[in-house]
């Protein structure tokens, strides 16, 4: 990983509450913490469609400055054991359900300047809960405070 | 149930490998452990840490990981376990626990959930720099969940095996199941064929063209793509693995579907409990964990075919160079290694090998040039050294005596988390042009490493208007190679007479070859004006 890709130590943890399809920024916690490099999106379909869950930190001009592809926090899912496989290993299947409400967090580099915001992309949770791959859309936008929180 | 049903005792760092702000921090929270059961929770934490750090790639990356536990005393032991029509094997228990863990979430017995808002608050209060967390529930019935950054797992017999899989989801990996309900999958018609929408997850794809596969840099040219295909989409593909275990390729059956989606390896922990993470999953985890500052990070540019995205052909690197000549016993081969990490390295080895140009690079073909041990390298330091490359028999096998084209590979051997920058390759070809004469033709051997017929295309490119390239004995487009076939091709050079007027003139060229439209190899070389040799070397 080249030096230029490391993200500096001033970070914010965003605490986000999800209730009945809406997200609310509950808290912003400043941290001194190194973050992993920003993720590139893989090539999507002919019109760029991509399924999954990720967020983008954008500056006031709308330019994406940081992105992380993450496990979808809006779906509860677990693995159920089906059977032991001949030759070793245990086969699994997925059991999943949409979360009615939950809390999740994002770690972002401390934003600079006015207008910084986070855009959350997600495939429809009900499709995710059924294992169906449906394009993600920018579902929520969270405006970030200008000043560093106390 | 909830924060009134217990109290947070406090956090304890149980594995300390470096400053908190520079480490990847994993936290384990207790739920359903009473005051008297905290020692059980502590033992469960040790069990999880031991299981995770014995498991690739966390074993290599252990130096980047800090672990904390947060002891929380619940009023009562266990977890809620509703007994309903759908959760018919629930016990009906209702238990006062701090995070209110429960089975039977959304009427799915094995699916556990907890108070995520409260868990997040406790994490933020107790271990501010946490990256990922697992709620360990003091309950023996199988259950758990993974989603977002906090997973949950019961702690019955064999729990760590499932917990490692769920932790993979917490790290951002997708399932690699070829089915939703279970194989053979004849009744799951909605899962016969994938929707075709590319997933963002690093270990699943709908792409079938090598150049578009998100893990293409880990697929060797010798591996056919797709590697396996499902001949009957109405059921799971049960064919045996046709390639060696662990081979990264494109295996049909992923994202819960029989066809139309692919996984990177035949098997992986994200598909089957009890097996290792595949190389692609490991690379993703490494990229999230190896923040790099608190450890050495030895690197060679451009990291061979591990670099993503690749900004140069994988057969070019500025960190391997030399002036080499076939038939000469002494050729200085220069290697450069850098330490881009935050700490000095230990002494390390570099293995230098070469492959005569056949269009195929795999470890079985590599011939050793030298294996050297280098001293510890300071953070930010650069180590340049020279190895001798003997290009005379027997160092150069007799069958390659007439070759002018070689691929040199340098590979760092060091125990590090970030291994994506440990291997690089540079192709050498130097064609000498005698004064007043023509350069000899360049002979290349192109191989079809696959088990299918392939159409071969060769691209000839001159980067100097004084130099032209043309095929001698082949059609650059539309040649067919049978499976396993190796074909020698000769490329001739036309050099403008003005070349001789410039001392040690050089002109660069590229020769690339494609199989079935996919760029698999090439050589970047030079025609150089040379004086004819006078007598033996």
Image (spheres, coloured by chain):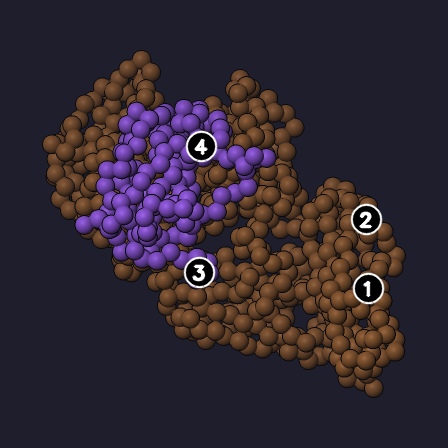
Chain colours: A purple, B brown
Q: Between marks 1 and 2, how big is the CA–CA gap? A: 18 Å
Q: Chain of mark 1?
A: B
Separation of residues labelled 3 and 1 (CA atoms): 40 Å
Q: How many other residues sit within 10 Å of disc 2, few (<14), some (14-19) or many (≥20)?
A: few
Residue B477: x, y in percent? 81, 48
Q: Which residue is mark 4?
A: A137
Q: Which residue is mark 2?
A: B477
**Closer mark to the observer between disc 2 and disc 4:** 4
- Are the residues under badges 1 and 2 in a single subunit? yes
Question: Are the residues under marks 2 and 4 on the same chain?
Answer: no
Q: Is residue B358 left or right of residue A27?
A: right
For label 1, the crowd category at 10 Å Cα-Cα, with few meaning under 14, some 14 to 19 and many 20 or more, is some
Which residue corresponds to the image point at 84% horizontal and 60% vertical from the top-left?
B470
- Alpha carbon separation for disc pair 3 and 4: 30 Å
Which residue is identified by label 1? Answer: B468
Determine whether B61 is above or below B325 in the image: above
Q: Quadrant of the N terminus of chain B?
A: top left
Q: Nearer the viewer, mark 1 or mark 2?
A: 1
Residue named by callout 3: A4
Q: Position of residue B168 (x, y in %)?
A: 40, 41
Name the chain under label 4.
A
Q: Are marks 1 and 2 in contact (CB under 8 Å)?
A: no
Residue B173 at x, y percent in the picture? 44, 40
Query: What chain is tagged by disc 2?
Result: B
* Same subunit: marks 3 and 2: no
3D distance between C-alphas at marks 1 and 4 = 51 Å
Residue depicted at x 40% and y 27%: A125
Question: What residue appears at the point 86 percent right and 74 percent down from the top-left corner?
Answer: B497
Under circle 1, the secondary element is: strand
């Amino acid at each position: 990983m080249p030096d230029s890709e490391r993200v500096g130590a001033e970070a914010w943890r965003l605490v986000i509450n999800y209730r009945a399809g809406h997200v609310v920024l509950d808290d912003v916690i400043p941290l001194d913490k190194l973050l992993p490099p920003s993720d590139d999106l893989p090539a999507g379909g002919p019109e760029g469609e991509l399924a999954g869950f990720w967020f983008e930190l954008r500056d006031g001009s709308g330019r994406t400055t940081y992105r992380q592809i993450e496990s979808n926090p809006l779906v509860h899912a677990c693995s159920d054991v089906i059977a032991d496989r001949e030759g070793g290993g245990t086969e699994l299947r997925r059991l999943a359900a949409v979360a009615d409400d939950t809390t999740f967090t994002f770690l972002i580099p401390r934003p600079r300047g006015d207008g910084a915001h986070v855009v959350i992309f997600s495939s429809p949770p009900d499709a995710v809960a059924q294992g169906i791959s449906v394009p993600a859309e920018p579902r929520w936008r969270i405006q970030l405070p200008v000043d560093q929180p106390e | 149930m909830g924060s009134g049903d217990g109290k947070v005792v406090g956090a304890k760092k149980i594995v300390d490998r470096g400053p908190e702000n520079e480490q990847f921090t994993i936290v384990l929270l207790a739920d359903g452990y009473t005051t008297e059961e905290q020692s059980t929770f502590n033992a469960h934490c040790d069990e999880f840490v031991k299981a995770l750090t014995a498991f690739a790639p966390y074993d290599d990356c252990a130096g980047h990981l800090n672990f904390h536990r947060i002891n929380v005393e619940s009023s009562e032991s266990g977890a809620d376990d509703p007994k309903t029509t759908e959760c018919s094997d629930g016990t009906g228990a209702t238990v006062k626990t701090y995070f209110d863990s429960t089975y039977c979430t959304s009427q799915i017995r094995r699916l556990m959930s907890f108070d995520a808002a409260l868990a997040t608050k406790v994490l933020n209060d107790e271990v501010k720099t946490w990256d990922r967390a697992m709620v360990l529930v003091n309950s023996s019935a199988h259950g758990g969940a993974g989603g977002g950054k906090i997973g949950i797992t019961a702690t019955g017999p064999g729990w760590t095996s499932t917990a490692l899989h769920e932790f993979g989801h917490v790290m951002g990996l997708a399932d690699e199941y070829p089915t939703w309900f279970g194989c053979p999958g004849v009744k799951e018609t909605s899962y016969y064929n994938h929707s075709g929408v590319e997933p963002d997850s690093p270990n699943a794809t709908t792409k079938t063209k090598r150049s578009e596969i998100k893990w293409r840099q880990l697929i060797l040219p010798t591996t056919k793509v797709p590697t396996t295909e499902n001949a009957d989409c109405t059921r799971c593909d049960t064919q045996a693995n046709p390639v060696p275990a662990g081979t990264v390729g494109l295996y049909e059956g992923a994202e819960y579907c029989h066809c139309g989606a692919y996984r990177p390896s035949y098997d992986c922990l994200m598909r089957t409990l009890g097996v290792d993470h595949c190389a692609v999953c490991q690379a993703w985890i490494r990229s999230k964990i190896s923040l790099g500052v608190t450890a050495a990070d030895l690197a060679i540019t451009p990291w061979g075919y591990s670099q993503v995205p690749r900004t140069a052909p994988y057969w070019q690197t500025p960190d391997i160079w030399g002036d080499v000549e076939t038939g000469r016993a002494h050729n200085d081969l220069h290697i450069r290694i850098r330490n881009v990490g935050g700490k000095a390295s230990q002494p390390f080895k570099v293995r230098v090998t070469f492959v005569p140009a056949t269009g195929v690079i795999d470890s079985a073909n590599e011939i050793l040039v030298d294996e050297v041990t280098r001293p510890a390298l300071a953070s930010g330091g650069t180590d340049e050294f020279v190895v001798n490359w003997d290009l005379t028999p027997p160092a150069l096998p007799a069958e390659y005596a007439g070759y002018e084209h070689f691929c040199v590979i340098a590979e760092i051997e060091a125990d590090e988390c970030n291994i994506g920058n440990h291997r690089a390759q540079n192709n050498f070809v130097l064609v000498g042009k005698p004064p007043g004469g023509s350069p000899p033709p360049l002979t290349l051997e192109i191989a079809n490493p696959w088990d299918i017929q392939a159409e071969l295309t060769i691209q000839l490119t001159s980067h100097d208007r004084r130099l032209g390239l043309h095929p001698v004995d082949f059609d650059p487009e539309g040649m067919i190679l049978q499976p396993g076939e190796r074909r020698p091709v000769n490329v001739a050079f036309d050099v403008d007479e003005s070349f001789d007027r410039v001392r040690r003139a050089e002109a660069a060229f590229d020769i690339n070859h494609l199989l079935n439209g996919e760029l698999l190899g090439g050589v970047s070389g030079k025609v150089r004006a040379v004086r004819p040799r006078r007598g033996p070397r």
